[in-house]
Amino acid sequence: MSEDILFNPGQAIASSYDYHSAYVAAQIYHQKSNHELLLVKDKNDKKMYYVFDNASLENQSQLDQKFQLIKRI
């Protein structure tokens, strides 16, 4: 099941063209911060993956681009 999410890529914790690199960066950040992270994929540029901190995004009222949720960490 796909889920559409809006984010600003400038607020990403990490970004990568490689899924595994983005996932490893998310795991490292999760171990340090213990926050829920979202690994998302840009729908326009299907090759780019971003990692966002869910706690910092909950208060965002305007978010810029469409992303597809890949995994919650």
Image (tube, rainbow, N blue to C red):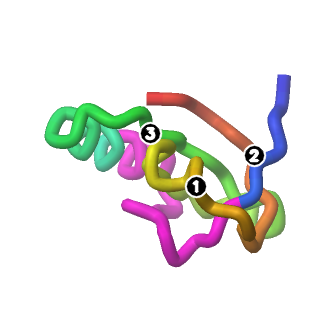
Q: Secondary structure at mark 1?
A: loop
Residue where numbered disc 3 is placed: 37
Q: Position of residue 1 (x, y in %)?
A: 84, 22
State how far apart marks 3 and 2 are (Cα): 14 Å
| Stretch in magenta | 7-23
Which numbered circle lies on residue 59? 1
1 in relation to 25, above or below: above
| Residue 47 visible from this viewpoint | yes
Q: Pick whichever, 51 or 20, lies toward us.
A: 51
Sequence-first tag of 3 and 2:
3
First in sequence: mark 2 vs mark 1: 1
15 within the magenta span: yes
Tell whether 45 sits left or right of 58.
right
Q: How many marks?
A: 3
Badge 3 element: strand
Find the residue positioned furthest to the bottom. Answer: 10
User: Mark 3, residues whose alpha carbon is within 10 Å: few (<14), some, or many (≥20)?
Assistant: many
Image quadrant in which you'd find residue 2: top right
Q: Is residue 51 visible?
A: no
Q: Does residue 26 belong to the magenta stretch?
A: no
Contact? badges 3 and 2 (CB < 8 Å): no
- Residue ID for mark 2: 68
The amino acid sitting under disc 2 is Gln
Amino acid type, callout 3: Leu
- Quadrant showing the C terminus: top left
Query: Measured along the vertical axis of the image, is residue 42 above or below residue 41?
Result: below
- The quadrant in which residue 8 appears is bottom right
Residue at screen point 75% across, 73% down: 64
